[in-house]
Image (tube, helix red, strand yellow):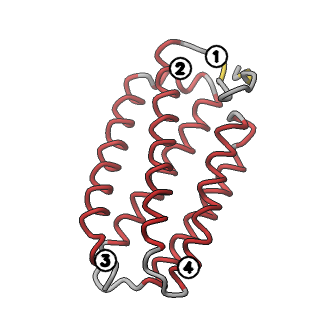
Amino acid sequence: NSIGAWRDFYGMSGAALATLIGLLFVAVSIHLEKILVVRPLTRNLGVALYGVVFQLLFCGFMLVPNVTLAEAGMIIIFVALGFAALSIRFATYRGRFDTLMNISFAMLAVPVGILLILGWAPALYFYAVIFGLTVVSLVRLCWRLLTMAMTGLTKWDGGPGEASDQLT
C-alpha cells in the first residue's frame, strides 16, 4: 500500500502539530484576558485552532491501517473544503492576504484529492507540499496572534502591500 510508505511522515507531522496546539493553548492561557478583549483575535485564534485540528485529524487518519488512496483523497477534499469555508466565514476578521492564502492552499488540495481518488499515488507528494505550506501559514498566524496579544497591538497587518485592518 503506497500510503503505508507515508506513515513516518504523518506520524512526525501529527506529533509536531500536537506540540504546536499544546504550545498555543499554553500561550493563549497566559494571555487570555488580552485576547478576549479583541474579538477579531479570538476569531483568528479559532481559524488557527481549526486549521491545526483539521491537519492533526488528517495525520491520524493517514495512520489508520489499510487506508486506500480513494479514502485519503475524499478526506483531503472534505478537509480542504471545510477549511476554505471556515476561512471565508472569518474573512472579515483577517487580512485579505491571509484569507486568500488559506483558500488557495485548500483549493490546491482539491485536485490532489481527485488524483488520489483516481488512484494516482504520486499525488501524495503534492499534498505533502500543500500540507507543509499550510502548517507554515498556521504557525505564522499563531505567532502573529500571540505577538499582538502580548504587545497590545490593535491592528491586523494584512500582509504584503496591504493596509492594516482595524481590529478594535
Q: Mark 2 or mark 4, which has the lower sequence index?
A: 4
Residue ID for mark 3 = 64
Considering the image in quadrants, where does the N terminus appear?
A: bottom left
Residue ID for mark 2 = 148
Q: Position of residue 149 (x, y in %)?
A: 51, 20
Residue ID for mark 4 = 115
Give the CA separation, mark 2 to mark 4. Answer: 40 Å
Q: Mark 1 or mark 3, which has the lower sequence index?
A: 3
Q: Secondary structure at mark 1?
A: loop
Residue drawn at x 37%, y 28% as measured from the top left: 27
Does the CB distance between marks 2 and 3 fall below 8 Å? no
Does the CB distance between marks 2 and 4 fall below 8 Å? no
Left or right: 50, with 13 as reference point:
right
Does the CB distance between marks 1 and 3 fall below 8 Å? no
Residue drawn at x 61%, y 59% as measured from the top left: 106
Does the CB distance between marks 1 and 2 fall below 8 Å? yes
Q: Position of residue 141 (x, y in %)?
A: 52, 35
Q: Mark 4 or mark 3, which has the lower sequence index?
A: 3
Q: Mark 1 or mark 2, which has the lower sequence index?
A: 2
For marks 2 and 4, give the one nearer the viewer. 4
Q: Mark 2 or mark 3, which has the lower sequence index?
A: 3
Above or below 7: residue 24? above
Above or below 104: residue 146? above
Given the image, on which type of amino acid does mark 2 rest? Answer: Met
Considering the image in quadrants, where does the C terminus appear?
A: top right
Give the CA separation, mark 2 to mark 3. Answer: 38 Å
Give the CA separation, mark 1 to mark 3. Answer: 43 Å
Residue ID for mark 1 = 154
Q: Position of residue 57 (x, y in %)?
A: 41, 63
Given the image, on which type of amino acid does mark 4 rest? Answer: Leu
Given the image, on which type of amino acid does mark 1 rest? Answer: Thr
Give the CA separation, mark 1 to mark 2. Answer: 7 Å
